[in-house]
Image: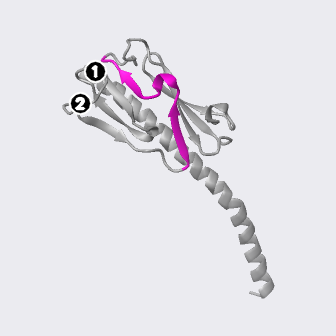
Amino acid sequence: MTLLELLVIIVIVGLLTTQGVPAMGHVLRDQRLQTASHTLYQALYYARSEAIRQGVPVMMVSEPDGWEQGWRIFADRDDDGEQSPSEPTLRAGGAPPGGLRLYANQPLRRYVRYASNGYSIRASGSFQIGSFYLCTTKATTPARRIVLSRGGRVRIERLPDGSDDCAR
């Protein structure tokens, strides 16, 4: 192999690397976003299932500093909206992976409460519907909305690039 051939190979490898590395970053970001949205979806589904299975209200509450710091699920046996020592944590989740932000609109700002029939009901007795937003730190990149419906069911929606929902 001559020096010229070796230089051509190095240039080709360099070009492929400069094209592949940014694309790989987008793939990793999208994978983190998808994993985090499915984790939240599964947690909400679990809370709803436990409310139906146990026949008591089940709450998914944010940490004191908000959903970005994590959450926990517990069966609210005394139906007071607070976790007492006799109500153990059924499941807990931490902060979303690096580079992602999680927040909710007003109806879900601090908690999601499932009644024993699986409906999402606020402490006041009204239906609890709303959305969680899972965004990247750059508001111009893809995001997800996790929507809680009137019947307590959850769905994941893909938000378009640059969505105003993430510009906070």
Q: Is 14 left, or right, of 93 in this rendering?
A: right
Mark 1, residues whose alpha carbon is within 10 Å: few (<14), some, or many (≥20)? Answer: few
Q: Nearer the viewer, residue 79 or 114?
A: 79
Query: In the image, what residue occupies the spot 52% across and 50% down?
Result: 98
Q: Looking at the image, is 154 positioned above or below residue 94?
A: above
Give the spatial CA distance, label 2 vs label 1: 9 Å
Q: Is 141 left, or right, of 123 in this rendering?
A: right
What mark, if any, has residue 71 been given in the picture? none
What mark, if any, has residue 80 been given in the picture? 1
Quarter occupied by the C terminus: top right
Q: Is 25 left, or right, of 53 in this rendering?
A: right
**Outermost right residue:** 4
Quadrant of res 121: top left
Quadrant of res 151: top left
Quadrant of res 100: top right
Please say if the residues under marks 2 and 1 sit with CB atoms less than 8 Å apart.
Answer: yes
Give the image location of residue 24, x and y in percent. Answer: 62, 56
Which residue is tagged 2? 84
Give the image location of residue 76, x and y in percent. Answer: 27, 25
At numbered mark 1, what does the secondary structure look like: helix, strand or loop? Answer: loop
Q: Disc 2 marks which amino acid?
A: Ser
Quarter occupied by the N terminus: bottom right
Q: Is 1 left, or right, of 37 in this rendering?
A: right
Write the start and end of the magenta stretch as one range. 99-116
Q: Disc 1 marks which amino acid?
A: Asp
Query: In the image, what residue occupies the spot 30% across and 21% down?
Result: 57
Q: Looking at the image, is 121 positioned above or below residue 160?
A: above
Give the total of numbered labels: 2
Mark 2, residues whose alpha carbon is within 10 Å: few (<14), some, or many (≥20)? Answer: some
Q: Is residue 114 magenta?
A: yes
Give the image location of residue 164, x and y in percent. Answer: 67, 32
